[in-house]
Amino acid sequence: MRLRRASFLAFSAVFCIREAASTQTSRQVAPSPPQQPIPFSHKMHAGNLQLQCKGCHPNPDPGEMMRIAPPSTCMACHSAIKTDSPAVQKLAAFAKEDREIRWARVYEIPAYVYFSHRAHSESGNTCAECHGQVAEREQLYREGDITMGGCMNCHREKKASLDCSYCHEPR
């Protein structure tokens, strides 16, 4: 009986250590960022150059979604900066042809959720609260927790409404 109990305890200890290690490892490993049509460093632009998020991500009325600036906005600087870069040359071609760049989405909320970027920013929230430390990232990956649980935790912390109809349309 003692041998069986000791074996069980040893197995349990090994299992718990293995699970703790795998949980710790999974927290440290960032998910792979999506492949983008043109390389873009948020670390360079938002970090080193300290460009404001809203300069590249306008928020037109009614304010729900942030947009990505058109290539012509990028060319305001890149017509003179890094013009020999193949990525900037590709960007210049998009701007010249007035074509939209089809960036791979990093964040997307379900269609049945009402979310206003404007309402959140006007109430004092920062981009980093949902999107993570973007200014430190070469490539973006889904870093912030935009699940229902993550949003509800934030609403609890900030004492915002937890009423279902606050974010979801009634059926």
Image: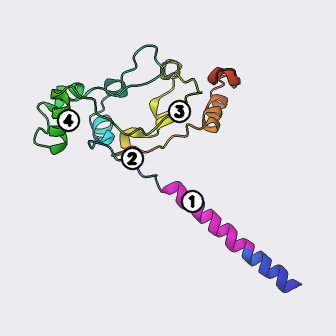
Q: Is residue 16 magenta?
A: yes
Labelled pair 2, 4 in contact (Cβ < 8 Å): no
Mark 2: give few (<14), some (14-19) or many (20+) Cα within 10 Å: some
Q: Amino acid at mark 3?
A: Ile
> Could you tell me residue 75's position as x and y percent?
18, 28
> Could you tell me residue 112's position as x and y percent?
59, 27
What's the CA distance linking mark 2 and mark 3? 17 Å
Q: Amino acid at mark 1?
A: Gln
Q: Which residue is mark 2?
A: 34
What's the CA distance linking mark 4 and mark 3? 28 Å
Q: Which residue is mark 3?
A: 109
Mark 1: give few (<14), some (14-19) or many (20+) Cα within 10 Å: few
Judged from the image, the secondary structure of the residue bearing numbered disc 3 is loop
Quick one: label 1 or label 3, which is nearer the N terminus? 1
Quick one: label 1 or label 2, which is nearer the N terminus? 1
Judged from the image, the secondary structure of the residue bearing numbered disc 2 is loop
Q: Amino acid at mark 2?
A: Pro
Quick one: label 2 or label 4, which is nearer the N terminus? 2
Can you tell which quarter of the image residue 59 is in? top left
Labelled pair 2, 3 in contact (Cβ < 8 Å): no
Image: magenta residue range: 12-29
Vertical relation: 95 (above or below) 41: above
> Could you tell me residue 116's position as x and y percent?
52, 21
Vertical relation: 166 (above or below) 131: above
Q: In the drawing, what numbered circle is on residue 24?
A: 1
What's the CA distance linking mark 4 and mark 1? 40 Å
Judged from the image, the secondary structure of the residue bearing numbered disc 4 is helix
What's the CA distance linking mark 1 and mark 3? 27 Å
